[in-house]
Amino acid sequence: MKQFIYFLSLSFLLLISACSDNATVIQYDKSLQQLSCLRLVIFPPDKLISHTLTDLYDFDNNCSYELQVSRKSGITCNSNQNADKKALSNFPTGYIRMDIYKNHKPLYSYYKDVNCKVSKEIIKDAFQQLKRDMLKEQK
């Protein structure tokens, strides 16, 4: 019985400390939607992001709205402060981030921690969310 209670307690702790699959989305100016264009900036340069996004959207290099995109995979945490989270939960190993700026002013931010390598599907899902939130439908 003690083992069962221990197992339930540990399971509950894992459940409440696990990383959420939900993305964090911030729309800084809620009145600004239905953008008609975006200029793509990827830093550091990344072929997977570039190919995936240019297949999904016709970016305009002259647009004043800048979409900055970055991803990271293979993150490891060596901090002792996160040892409990790392041991007891799905500590994220990567992220995808997409931000829209105009004149260096943030307008929109999408950020999602992932527990796997950032893939084409994760990039597509992130862009589809951004598209629903901020872009006019392209013809």
Image (cartoon, helix red, strand yellow):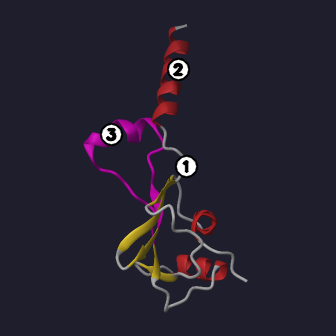
Residue type at tag 2: Phe
- Magenta range is 69-98
Q: Nearer the viewer, residue 74 or 43?
A: 43
Mark 1 to mark 2: distance in Å?
A: 27 Å
Residue type at tag 1: Asn
Name the side, left or right, on which 75 lies relative to 127: left
Q: Give the labeled residue for mark 2.
A: 7
Q: Quadrant location of the N terminus?
A: top right
Can residue 14 be seen in this snapshot?
yes
Q: Nearer the viewer, mark 3 or mark 1?
A: 1
Q: Dot 3: what SS?
A: helix
Task: Find the residue positioned furthest to the bottom.
Answer: 62
Can you give x and y, in whole percent of width and height, for residue 42 in the image?
A: 45, 79
Near mark 2 (Cα within 10 A), the count class, few <14, some 14-19 or many ≥20, is few
Quarter where residue 107 is shown:
bottom left
Q: Give the labeled residue for mark 3.
A: 83
Quarter where residue 133 is shown:
bottom right
Q: Nearer the viewer, mark 1 or mark 2?
A: 1
Q: Dot 2: what SS?
A: helix
In percent of the image, x 49 and y 92: which residue is there? 62
Mark 3 to mark 1: distance in Å?
A: 23 Å
Can you give x and y, in whole percent of width and height, for residue 119 in the image?
A: 58, 66
Q: Dot 1: what SS?
A: loop
Circles 1, 2 touching at the beta carbon (< 8 Å): no
Sequence order check: which comes first, mark 3 or mark 1?
1
Q: Nearer the viewer, residue 100 or 85?
A: 100
Can residue 122 be seen in this snapshot?
no
Q: Quadrant location of the C terminus?
A: bottom right
